């Protein structure tokens, strides 16, 4: 295969991988604080995209995105306050089922608030036909934006969890909730904060993805499944690993398309996922000892 | 009955039965027409205009005195383009609601699945989906209103041949419509001197098609033909240009909704596709048999719903007006007589073309029902030859 073609496949893989990566990040925050998978994460993505497209009619793009992120963070906090907070020591399974219910609620709510039509946010830079040319191969500028934003989010999260009091308190919650409470950490508030953050990141991801994948009220579930798969592949709880795993999976799928018919793309990625989970149940980058301590 | 309140249960049951009998008697005076449309979901650009059109027409007919003096009752079900839901709604409409006819479904996949249900239930099916396989082989009770995908294929090949673009790539969605179109493209390629270098099928909920288009770029195709009705139609256009490919993009007649053009933005410029005349009604010559009804439908639809007409709404328009005309000609709502009346319709002007039904042809349209359209300045215009 000539270099240009190889590079083109590489860029196509990066584009798809970036989509997976940015969705996967959102799962890890709630998982780290509460140990549950929030299946409404996909809906946060779509909600962010929808609000941003509505706001973009009257506001400039950066303000519309900021507004969408803020509004979705409020929704995330509400989800926790209304559905999760008043439960007394719920099991993980019960919480997961509740989040699935919340996702259905949000989806129908979006259908009624907006309609069934497909929308897309404007490309952050350039238009629908812009293309960046690198060494003879092309990539859409929006894909680079998605990658860049994913990287920024991961970096910001790393700093947050390591250097701020709230971040360290959330890690304490994840390690041992009772011990954290004994230290005077208000665990309930941190759970709400984690939902807030997760929703905000989801909304930002949704806005960045909207020019690429378009936004429709029922896209939440398919996107969430993709992101969740990648989060598991990288090792639940580790955002950097999620981004890396997303890129790896995207590249794997794209190169499989170069050899096999497109119809086998999902089969290949699922087969790889299963193989990795058999060999390394903690995910590609998960550590064995840490894995044994977690419920999931 | 020794249980307490046993007499109460008997009373409730008899009241319910009496009410049901009363309601059943009251229904005799309405004409019940069922519709299964994909109002939400991946085919909502088809089902939503179809549902709106049917609602508009039913209100219009009822306002003018109804059908044979009786009110028309539309029973609309939203299948979300799911063939499983379509089957279950079809059974419900035929067995519980006992409708005269079912209009829709919106997609070929669903239509192919409910064909047999309607044939067994002896209920007229007027599908709004395009795959030729719906009416070929002909089933007595199954009709369709959109043009055949075979005709669209021949129009596309004629365009390609005229420009010497003989080495093409085909991408289609993994649905009844997409697979049907791909089959037609492969069937008619050899006799038209077209070489399909590569034909791939993508998932109907795909959010990125860069990988498969990279494969087409590697094979150096001279043109790309896309066959789907999902929002992926817009994705193909965008991903193609983002990859730096300048080759022409041709679409099926599933592109006939301006929302696909809006979603693709600048990437939609120059897309060529065969389509019914509804979208270019104003530039038709004045004597054209379709012009008056096309402009009338366009004006009323756009005034009532505030959005541009699409050919899909037109297919529902044709389905309803054909049924209404057949009921008038048969002078009754007996399903068998209405069915015969549909088969006997000739020279019936609809939005998709002039219909000429017969026992062997349950679609009634021919190659002349298309025009070649293109996108210029974000609008649909006639392609100048």
Image (cartoon, grey):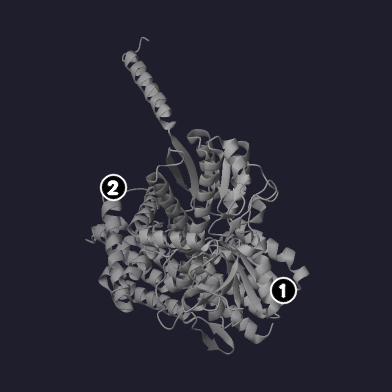
x and y, in percent, of residue A26 in the image: 39, 66
Residue at x 31%, y 74% (from the top left corner): A64
Q: Is residue A108 left or right of residue B147?
A: left
- Near-viewer residue (B129 or B64): B64
Does residue A19 appear anywhere in the picture? yes
Q: Is residue B380 left or right of residue A82?
A: right
Q: On what subunit does the disc labeled 1 rest?
A: B
- Count of marks overlaid on the render: 2
x and y, in percent, of residue A37 in the image: 41, 57
Q: Of the numbered discs in the image, which one, if any, rests on residue B197?
A: 1
Q: Is residue A123 above or below residue B52?
A: below
Please identify the residue farthest to the top as the structure is shown: B2
Does residue A259 appear anywhere in the picture? no
x and y, in percent, of residue A53 in the image: 35, 70
Q: Is residue A5 above or below residue B132?
A: below
- Near-viewer residue (B295 or A111): B295
What secondary structure is found at the residue carrying circle 1?
Answer: strand
State which quarter of the image contains the N terminus of chain B: top left
Residue at x 45%, y 68% (from the top left corner): A214
What secondary structure is found at the residue carrying circle 2?
Answer: loop
What is the crowding at mark 2: few (fewer than 14 residues within 10 Å), some, or many (at least 20)? Answer: few
What is the crowding at mark 1: few (fewer than 14 residues within 10 Å), some, or many (at least 20)? Answer: some
Residue B211 placement: quadrant = bottom right
Residue at x 44%, y 54% (from the top left corner): B53
x and y, in percent, of residue A256 in the image: 64, 70
Please identify the residue farthest to the bottom as the structure is shown: A135
Residue picked out by circle 2: A88
State which quarter of the image contains the C terminus of chain B: bottom right
- Near-viewer residue (B122 or B207): B122
């Amino acid at each position: 295969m000539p270099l240009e073609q190889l590079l083109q496949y590489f860029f196509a893989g990066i584009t798809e991988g970036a989509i997976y990566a940015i969705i996967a990040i959102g799962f890890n925050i709630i998982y780290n604080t509460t140990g549950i998978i929030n299946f409404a994460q996909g809906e946060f993505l779509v909600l962010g995209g929808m609000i941003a497209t509505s706001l973009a009619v009257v506001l400039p793009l950066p303000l519309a995105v900021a507004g969408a992120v803020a509004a979705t963070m409020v929704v995330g906090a509400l989800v926790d306050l209304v559905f999760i907070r008043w439960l007394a020591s719920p099991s993980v399974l019960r919480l997961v089922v509740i989040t699935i219910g919340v996702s259905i609620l949000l989806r129908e709510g979006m259908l009624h608030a907006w309609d069934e039509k497909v929308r897309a946010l404007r490309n952050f830079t350039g238009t629908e036909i812009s293309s960046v040319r690198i060494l003879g191969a092309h990539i859409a500028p929006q894909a680079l934006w998605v990658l860049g934003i994913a990287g920024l989010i991961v970096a910001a999260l790393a700093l947050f969890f390591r250097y701020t009091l709230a971040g360290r308190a959330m890690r304490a919650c994840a390690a041992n909730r009772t011990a954290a409470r004994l230290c005077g950490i208000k665990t309930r508030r941190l759970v709400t904060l984690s939902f807030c953050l997760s929703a905000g990141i989801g909304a930002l991801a949704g806005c960045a993805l909207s020019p690429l994948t378009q936004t429709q009220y029922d896209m939440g579930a398919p996107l969430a499944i993709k992101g969740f798969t990648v989060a598991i592949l990288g090792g639940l709880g580790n955002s950097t690993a999620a981004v890396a795993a997303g890129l790896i999976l995207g590249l794997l799928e794209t190169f499989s398309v170069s050899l096999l018919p497109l119809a086998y793309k999902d089969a290949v990625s699922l087969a790889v996922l299963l193989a990795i989970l058999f060999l390394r149940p903690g995910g590609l980058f998960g550590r064995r000892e840490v894995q044994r301590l977690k419920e999931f | 009955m020794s249980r307490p309140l046993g007499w109460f249960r008997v009373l409730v049951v008899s009241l319910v039965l009496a009410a049901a009998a009363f309601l059943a008697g009251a229904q005799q005076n309405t004409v019940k027409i069922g519709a299964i449309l994909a109002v939400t979901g991946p085919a909502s650009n088809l089902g939503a205009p179809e549902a709106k059109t049917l609602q508009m027409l039913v209100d219009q007919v009822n306002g003018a005195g109804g059908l044979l003096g009786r009110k028309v009752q539309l029973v609309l079900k939203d299948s979300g383009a799911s063939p499983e839901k379509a089957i279950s709604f079809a059974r419900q409409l035929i067995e519980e609601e006992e409708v005269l006819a079912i209009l829709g479904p919106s997609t070929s996949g669903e239509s192919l699945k409910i064909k047999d249900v309607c044939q067994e239930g002896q209920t007229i099916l007027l599908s709004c989906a395009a795959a030729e396989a719906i009416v070929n082989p002909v089933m007595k009770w199954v009709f369709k209103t959109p043009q055949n995908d075979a005709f669209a294929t021949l129009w596309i090949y004629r365009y390609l041949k005229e420009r010497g673009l003989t080495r093409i790539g085909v991408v289609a969605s993994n649905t009844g419509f997409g697979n049907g179109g791909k089959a037609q493209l492969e069937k008619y390629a050899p006799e038209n001197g077209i070489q399909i270098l590569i034909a791939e099928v993508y998932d109907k909920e795909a959010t990125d098609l860069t990988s498969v288009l990279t494969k087409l770029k590697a094979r150096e195709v001279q043109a790309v033909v896309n066959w789907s009705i999902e929002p992926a139609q817009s994705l193909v256009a965008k991903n193609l240009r983002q990859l730096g490919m300048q080759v022409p993009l041709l679409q099926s007649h599933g592109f006939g909704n301006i929302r696909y053009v809006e979603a693709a933005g600048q990437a939609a410029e120059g897309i060529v596709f065969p389509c019914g005349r509804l979208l270019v009604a104003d530039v038709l010559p004045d004597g054209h048999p379709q012009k008056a009804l096309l402009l009338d439908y366009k004006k009323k639809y756009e005034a009532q719903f505030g959005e541009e007409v699409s050919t899909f709404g037109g297919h529902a328009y044709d389905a309803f007006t054909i049924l209404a005309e057949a009921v008038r000609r048969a002078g009754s709502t007996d399903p068998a007589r209405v069915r015969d009346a549909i088969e006997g319709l000739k020279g019936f002007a609809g939005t998709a073309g002039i219909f000429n039904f017969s026992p062997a042809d349950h679609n009634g349209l021919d190659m002349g029902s298309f025009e070649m359209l293109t996108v210029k300045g974000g609008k649909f215009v006639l392609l100048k030859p």
